[in-house]
Amino acid sequence: METNKEQTREHPRSKNSALSIIGKAILIFVALNLIFAIWLPLPALGRVSAYNHLFPGRKRLPYSDNPQKAYNLSLYNLEAMFASHEIAAGDKPADEYRVILIGDSATWGFLLPSEHTVSAYLDGAGTKLPDGRHVRVYNLGYPVMSLTKDLLILSNSLRYDPDLIIWSLTLESFPYDKQLFPPLLQNNPDPVRSLIETYHLNLDPLDENLKDRSLVERTIYGARRSLADLIRLQLYGVMWAATGIDQDIPDIFTARMEDLPAEEGFHDFQPPHLNEGDLAFDVLAAGVSMAGDIPVLFINEPMFISQGENSDIRYNYYYPRWAYDDFRRMMLGQSRENEWHYLDMWDFIAPSEFTNSAIHITPLGTQQFALKIGETIEQYANQDS
């Protein structure tokens, strides 16, 4: 009985000790979350990568709608995206003429294995310049059409010392209502606002699409999804290294639209003409200014030209003829006025070589596109030699 009394007397003390431990644990947890929220090391954490170390860097920036089959995923940490890419493997070799490609899903290579993208064909050509340098081409395209998205990618790519920037574009990337549409921009509000303010872009830095994180969202708990994505990206690197697969390409897909609606509108614009102020040419000017002495070549990328119903009204699903013709006229005029390097390849690829949209091309069409670009690269590289 005496023993039981002693145990009874000790029970409150044990309970207080347990509560003290729990209380301290909660305080430590809160403190760590607040430190994390104030320091916000997510970009810095993104630089820690097994790519280019334990397994090879990716051929294109990570993006996927089906991570389990693509061994890839979409995330919004720019540092992690670039750290996973082959361009981050190390310092640029002295004998390398470095070309970077930026643009939309056509540049990234939607429905194309990594070995059949424009960059892969260009890189595989093994071009050697008279001065002994080898041309290396890096794919920094990223899906979703927006010039400001391209500008954000460009701003992060200049640290890798390119010798030539090729910016592949199309009219759908130009309307102002598309500029802040990509989730990549919406989840990186600070660098986007910096671009807007530095280059005086005709965009609102307080746009509601730019998502500032609250204090809670910046804690470890609030950022758990982003932290999980960083870990998953590393884990998928194992399968990427083993298979070379970075995109789930279905055997069957819906073909690009041949018969078109009798609709003449383009976004909120109606015929007969577009005005230059309707399109974000200021973003292109910002890219040229940002690049400084590095030449920037704008390419109006090939697109599908329908021969079906209402093809007298529209070229394809995206573009009524009047709007696209105005765009080509304005793009040429802007290039001449600003002395931009510009190559118009809008009708370079046969309609049969387009897949599920008006801008996605088959491997054969992509190879033809790459051959023409390769000739242009040699011209610029030889001037630089």
Image (cartoon, rainbow, N blue to C red):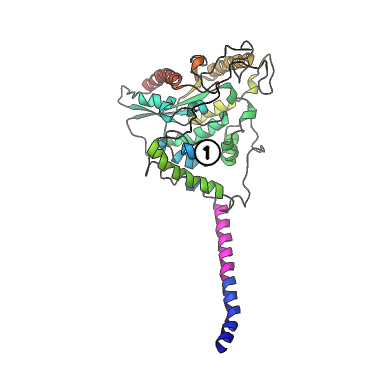
Viewport quadrant of the N terminus: bottom right
Decide if residue 340 is in sight here.
no
Q: Position of residue 127 (x, y in %)?
A: 34, 23
Choose top left, top right, bottom left or bottom right for residue 115: top left
The overriding secondary structure of the stretch rendered in magenta is helix
Q: Residue at x 45, y 35 (%)?
A: 246
The reply to whether residue 241 is visible in this rendering is yes
Q: Residue 265: x, y in percent?
A: 68, 19
Q: Which quadrant of the structure image shows residue 131?
A: top left
Mark 1: amino acid: Ser
* Residue at 58%, 53% in the rendered image: 221
Q: Where is 91 relative to 33, above or below?
A: above
Q: Toward the viewer: 127 or 118?
A: 118
Q: Where is residue 366 in the image (x, y as percent from the top left)?
A: 45, 21
Q: Please report the bounds of the magenta region as a residue range.
A: 20-41
The residue under the point 60% across, 38% down is 186
The extreme top residue here reads: 312
Q: Quadrant of residue 358?
A: top right
Q: Is residue 382 left or right of residue 267?
A: left
Residue 46: % across, % down: 48, 45
Q: Is residue 28 magenta?
A: yes
Residue 12 placement, left or right of 95: right
Which residue is disc 1 drawn over?
A: 74
